[in-house]
Every structure is written in C-alpha cells, then in structure tokens.
Image: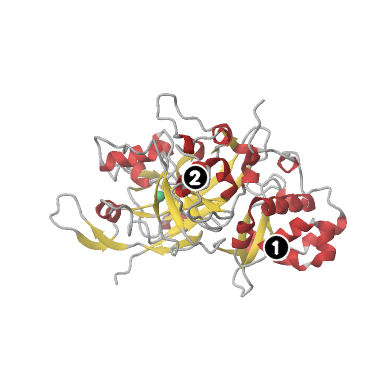
Amino acid sequence: MTTLPAFAALDPTHDPAAKSWLASANGHADFPIQNLPLAVFRRAGSAEAWRGGVAVGDQIVDCAALAGLGTLVGGAMLSADALAAVRLASQPTLNALMAAGAPARRALRHGLFAALHSSAGAAVQNALQRCLVPQAQAQYALPSQIGDYTDFYTSIHHARNVGRVVRPDNPLTPNFQWLPIAYHGRASSVVVSGTAFRRPMGQAMAPGEAQPAYGACKRLDYELELGFWVAGRNAMGEPIALAQAEDHLFGVCLLNDWSARDHQFWEMAPLGPFLGKNFCTSVSPWIITPEALAPFRRPFVRPADEPQPLAYLDHASNRTAGAIDIQLSVAIGTEQHRQRGLAASEVSRTTFAHQYWTPAQMIAQHTVGGCNLNAGDLIGSGTISGPAPTEAGAIVELSRGGQQDVLLSATGEVRRFLQDGDEVVLQGWCQAPGAARIGLGQCCGIVLPATAP
Ligand code: CA
C-alpha cells in the first residue's frame, strides 16, 4: 500500500457526508464545510478594518469578530492553537498566518470545521452566528502584502500553441521539458478580482512595417492561471528541497495574467516579458488550502518517451500526489451581455491536472539557486491549456494568433482579441468520487479604454 504524502492525507474534515448547521453550506457548489477557504474582506462601502474571513455557504466567518469573542467563549469553541490562528487571521493581511505555515492553517480548519458542524452545541452555534457576514455584503482586498510575484510557464500545450505563433518550425524551446520556466513579475499591479484596468499603451511592431508604432494595445489577451500563495520562508542561499516544497504552499487561487500580445512579442527578445505583462494581474479573493485540495490530488506522470525530471525535481511524494485536478473555465462577457442580462459566454474549459510541472516542482526550481521566498509571495502557474483546442487558456490560442473568430455563444458576437468593455470571468472547482465538490469562486476583470499620457 502506498503511503500518501501529508498534503494528500484525508481526515474527517473531508467526509462528503459531513453537514453544517448553517443551511447554505450544505450542497453549496463552492463553499461547503469541506472547503473553508480564506480571504481578506470588509463590508462593502464601509470604513471597517480589513480582516481575514473564512467562506462557508453564502456567509463569511469574520475572524476579527471571532477573535473578539474572547478566551471564555472562543476557548470553549476552539483549541488554543485554533484560537491563535484565528487571531493571526484577524489582521488586515494574512501574511502572519502565512508565515505560521501549515500547523496554524490546519488548526484553524479543524477548529472551524467542528464549530460549523451540525453536531456543534447550541452555545457554539449562537456565538458563531454573531460572527457571520453575508458574502453578498462583502468587498475583498488582496489577501497578502505581496513582496514578490513570479509567473511560471508550465503548460506544454500552451507553450506549443503560442510557440507556433512565434516560431512555427520550432514551437517548443529545448529547455521546456527539463525545467519549469518563469520570469519575475511585478507585484505592484496585482489586483483583487473585480478591479477594472485600462488597456495599456506601448510600442509594437506590426508585420511588414519598417519601424514600431506607439499606441493602445491592439492584441489584448487574458491568461487562465492558478496563483500559489507562499507559506513560511527560506533563508537566502538555502534551497527548498522538492520533498519539503509543499510545506511552502499556503493555498491556491485563480489568476489572470492579462497580456498585451503586440507589445509583448516585440519587446521580449532577448530578455523576456516586461510591459506586455506588468499593467495588471488579477487574483480571486479566496485562497483554497492544500487541506481542502487533498481529495483532488493526482499522481504526477511523465510519459516514458519524454525527458524524466532531474533528481532535484523528482521525489516519491511528487510522483504519488504532486498534481492537482482543478477544473477550470474561461468566459467572456461584453456590454451586450450586460444589457441583455446574459451570463458571460464560456469559451474554454480544462483542468490543471494537464500541467507539465507541479506546484512543488515550481517552488523547488524557484529556490534551487538560493533565491529566498517569503510568506505572502505570489507564484503564477503559467497559462493552463489542455491538449484539445477547446481547452486553450488564452484567446491568442483560441483565435490561432488572431486569425480565427472566437464565438461568444450567448450573443453571437465574435472576438479575436479583447475589446474595451469586455469582462473575463475565470472559474475553478474540484470534483471527485467520494469527495464533496469544492470551488475556488471567480476571478473577474473588465477592460477600460486606454488613456494616452
Ligand atoms: Ca502568464
């Protein structure tokens, strides 16, 4: 019998039959009590302090209110470790909770699971009721003060699809199958879902032209990605071994790496992405923990006829359960969708299980040269595209480099790149036999017209 790594271990918090006394949690598509993701929030339109919260059903458990119940009530409800974690989560960012790592996060999960479970006593239910804020009344902030942001490039299908646009005869670079490729991104322009941004100005070289032109981006794109929030830290010069890499994964969110393709493809030789990527990156507010994702872990399998990972990127725990089956979709909404009250039109659907490298391999690679990661850092997975054309995670792939129309089914409109007023909606969820469905929620952003300086 194979022993599963700790990040894939199941316990009573994964019981699909577990129910909450909070009716909206039971059967909730995203936030049943088996999920319990974290975000930073306050009541919309208020001047309240930002603080951490935990989603359950259509409510948020307000960690500051819970910490404020005091030791008498809180101590009767939660263990000392769980109460300490709630206090860390009651701050305006989750950096302190992220620094405390897996033990604090697990104590919080187990404490809240018990308090929200249908078997919780009346006193616990009454006390916790006073700490609930409806999600419909909430606004969200970034969950951490992000020190550094790195974006990987780890989908072989995306690399081949985009590579064909740039290098038709040699789409895959020789390093791709040997190491998880990345570039250091820009933390200052990472925003929480729902934040609008301006179409970027910049320089591009149109085909057949003698010199580049300055202007608004003409090939604006999105990238369907996952974001990984870093837990704990490693000292500079001390790499994180693959076997310990998951200890540094605090949780997962949706991430949209908005991309100005015309600017990007002109500027990125020979040094890599710069202005084509640094004007906006959107993340979903809720962080799904490794504990919640445990039932959806999958083996990491590299086909026998492809290069096998070098020893420092290989470990039994990564082979056994390094991959995660997170289902993902992309939808585009337009002004016409909004006027007619229509939901955004889905344009693709795939799973993170196709990714060529795992989160643990990305963390190990990031630090192998001695680079230090800090709690609250953000790591992007790179665009997530599956093997089928309908599984592409960017519109440049769906439109074959802008050569084909992409149909928006709800209105019959077509797109080759994004237009002003377009909204992109990323969604993620996990389903598996014997497990309760959980969701990541949504990551949304809307394109505003450019303003020239
Ligand atoms: Ca990207």
Residue located farthest toward the left when viewing the structure as drawn: 210
Q: Position of residue 152 (x, y in %)?
A: 42, 47
Say whether residue 174 is left or right of residue 281: left
Work out whether 254 lies above or below 451. Answer: above
The residue nearer to you, when weighing 186 against 412, is: 186
Q: Quadrant of the C terminus?
A: bottom left
Q: Position of residue 401 (x, y in %)?
A: 29, 44
Report crowding for label 1: few under 14, some 14 to 19, many 20 or more residues within 10 A (C-alpha).
many
Work out whether 379 lies above or below 143. Answer: above
Q: Which residue is mark 1?
A: 63
Residue located farthest toward the bottom when viewing the structure as drawn: 47
Q: Between marks 2 and 1, how big is the CA–CA gap? A: 32 Å
The residue nearer to you, when weighing 424 against 165, is: 165
Name the residue rendered at 63%, 37% in the picture.
5
Q: Quadrant of residue 316?
A: top right
Amino acid at pointer 2: Ala
Residue located farthest toward the right when viewing the structure as drawn: 122
